[in-house]
Structures are given as C-alpha cells and as structure tokens.
Image: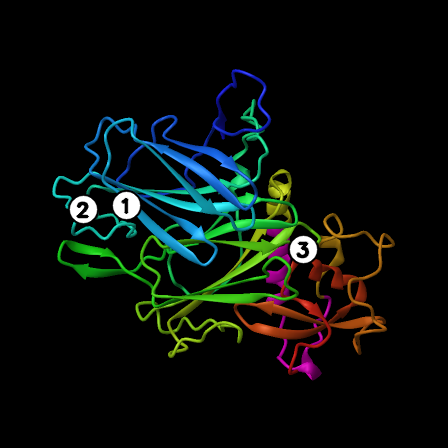
Amino acid sequence: YDTIAPTSAPTNCYDRVNVAPVRKAGDDMAIPEGAVTIVEHDGATVKFKVTQLWKDVDVKMLAFQYRETASAEKCFPDTTVDFGTTYEHTAVCFDGFASVGIYLYTGDDFDPTTCEACKQPTDIDDGVALFYFEMPCNSECAPPTPTSETEASNCYDDVVLDDSSGTCVYDASPVSIVSQHGSTVKFSVSHTWDIAQTHALGVVPAALSQMSIRYKAQGENSMGCTTRLEPAAGYLDTYTAQCNSNGLAQVEIFVHDSTFPKDSSAEIPDECDQPTDPDHTCGYSFVIPCNADMMCDSNRRMQKIRSHMKEVKEESYAPGLSSSILMESFKKTSLETDLPAEGDEDPYCAAEDFPCEGDSPNMVYVCHYSVTKGYQTFCVPEADSDILRLYSSDYCGKCDGQ
C-alpha cells in the first residue's frame, strides 16, 4: 500500500490509504493516484471512496460491485461521471476483507440503457475495464513500503503446484495469494484454462463446464468443496483456507469440460459435485504458504517433498490393505531438516493407536490423498508419519472404507 503523510497525528489510517487492485480485466487502463481510497473500516464493513480522475479517456459510466449485505452482492451503476466526481460506498467484510469490483465504461458506442453493468469483460470487450480489489477491514495502518530489494522479494507471490492429474492446459496459475494471516490464508481462484469458442468476432475464451475448489475452511475440521458451474473466462473468486501447524494450506482444483482430453479422468472426491461424464476431467493440488516471511523456505520444502513423493509413487505396489506396505517409504533423511527431529516430539501417528505389520517394528497405517490416485492406505514406520503434518487431507489410520 502507498500512504499519504498525515497533517496531524491520526488515530487510524482513514482517508489516507490508497488501495491497489489485485486483478484487472478488459481494457488495459491504469488507476490514477488517489482514485480509490479507504475512508473508514470497523472490522465488519469498509467504506471506500472512488474519484473520477481518468482524464485521458471519455468515461461514460462507472459501476461498483460489492456485498451491500452479507447475503447479497449488488451492482451500482452511475452515469454521473464528470471529472472530479466522488462516489462513496460501504461494503460488507468477510474474513477481514471486502471484495470490490470497479467497472469503467469508455466505449464510443456505449449505451447505458442497453448495457449489462458489472458483467465480466473479456479480451474482446472494447471500452470496458475492471479493477478488482480486496480491501482490508481493520483499522491498522498500511504496512510500510519495502526499503530494499530483498524485502520486496518476488518469492512472496509463489503458490506451489504439488500434484496434478490429466493434461488440461492453463495459461497461468489458477490459484493466487490475496493475503496471508498465519493461521489462515486468503487466496483467489480464476478460470485460466486454454479453451475457446467460435464467436461472431472470432475465437474467444469460453466458460468451463464445471470447476470444484476443495480446501479446509476456517473453523472446519475437514476439507470441504465448492463447485461452480460454467464459470466464465476471467472468472475470479476468493476463499479463506485454514493453515496447518507447519503454516501451509492445501487447495485442490478439479475442472471438467468436454474440450479437455478424454483420457484425462482425475478422481473427484465425494464431497464435490460429480460431472455427468467422468472423463475430460483434470485435478490439481496446490500448497499455499500462510506467512510471507516463510514462503521461500516453504517452496524449497515442497520441492523436496514433491521429489520424495515422486520416489514413493514410483514404488511398485498394489492397492488394498494386504499389499499396501510401502518399503522404505517416506525416507526420514530427506525430511529431517523440515519436520520435528527425533526426540523433539511424539510421532504424528502412534503405533499403539494405528498398528500394522511390516518389515520393521512400530509400523503404522496412514491414509494419503493424491489427485492422481485418490485416497490410499499405506503401512509406514511410525517415525515417518510426521510427513502427514504437511498434508491437510492425510490422516492416521486406514482410509475410510478400506
């Protein structure tokens, strides 16, 4: 955030916080300095002010999209667009932030009487620009601008793709970090898959048939799933995930569309809505660091874990309890720098609670989830069960139903 120096000592940051969009769509336009500011916020709502400072374009209409109440998102178009005009609105907050979309209409042929305001623009929408904001709802001052290149490290933006199934090509990562809060992380999911349809103006991005987002919401004991039907190209929504004890959140995305390869048939968990056709489906598992100051370390950790899990998956084994003993699985030497060292704390899964028979004493059953193979039961050394701390879908014992 950029801050404007106050003329006297303020009691909060009201009237002096410029906010920057987390996403833009449609026409490539810049936001003038001071055009969007926070007026006040009380934790439950945020009042923001927009000033018409676009002087290099012929503005025909502005529209504001946000939740006026907890149950309803509304669109407020305004054709009073003289230069310098100000607009104040109050949005309801969720998980400490309010989602606000500001639409700028400048097309030569624009007619407000026929316009469908607050409709997501596409790449072929000439004269429509969308600025999407996540506005903080607390009264803390904006964080200081980093003073060095190290403090502004780009690794703060990384989301790790941990696993995938199928060959559905996307143009950019569909998962992005919005804000990190230690015990939770707010993230956005967008439709970035490379599918298109024939349009009167040519080939344009098309909607997906179905997208499911699976994660552990704040306050929940297990992962839940939200399904979106026919999300349009450029679709974006935000969610808040609960983080595990290692400061990581797991997010899974499942997409289905008839244009995807038929042999892509990722297994969608039961808690998600199932498509009518099990084929043409891809799955992705992402890991999101929940603290900005540990993201780079998390990336190195997850690269090591992904490499190790690849070795495990390449082991020859058959599914089922009687043959699910994974020899020399979850090598402790590859994890000892990231997980509790021997003697520091009890194993994540205790042999007295989840015993199984293997080639060494103190073996335990663990249930591991992969978007490639679904839930599978393994028998591993008790000490190696600590790897489950990094996967919110995994748990001690046999997988349900096995």
Q: Please tell me which of labels 1 and 2 falls first in the chain.
A: 1
Label 3 sits on a secondary structure element that is loop
Mark 1–mark 2 contact, CB under 8 Å? Answer: yes
User: In this orientation, which residue lies closer to the viewer: 389 or 262?
Assistant: 389
Kindly identify the residue that appears in the image at 21 percent across and 35 percent down: 59
Report if residue 91 lies within the magenta region.
no
Segment colored magenta: 302-328
Q: Residue at x 59, y 61 (%)?
A: 216
Q: Quadrant of residue 309?
A: bottom right
Residue receiving disc 1:
77
Q: Amino acid at mark 2?
A: Pro
Query: Disc 2 on helix, strand or loop?
Result: loop
Q: Nearer the viewer, mark 2 or mark 3?
A: 2
Residue 173 at least partly seen: no
List x then y, in percent, for residue 337.
74, 48
For residue 233, what is the image quadrant? bottom left
Q: Is residue 313 magenta?
A: yes
Q: Is residue 131 visible?
A: yes
* Amino acid under disc 3: Asn
User: Local crowd at mark 3 within 10 Å, few (<14), some, or many (≥20)?
Assistant: some
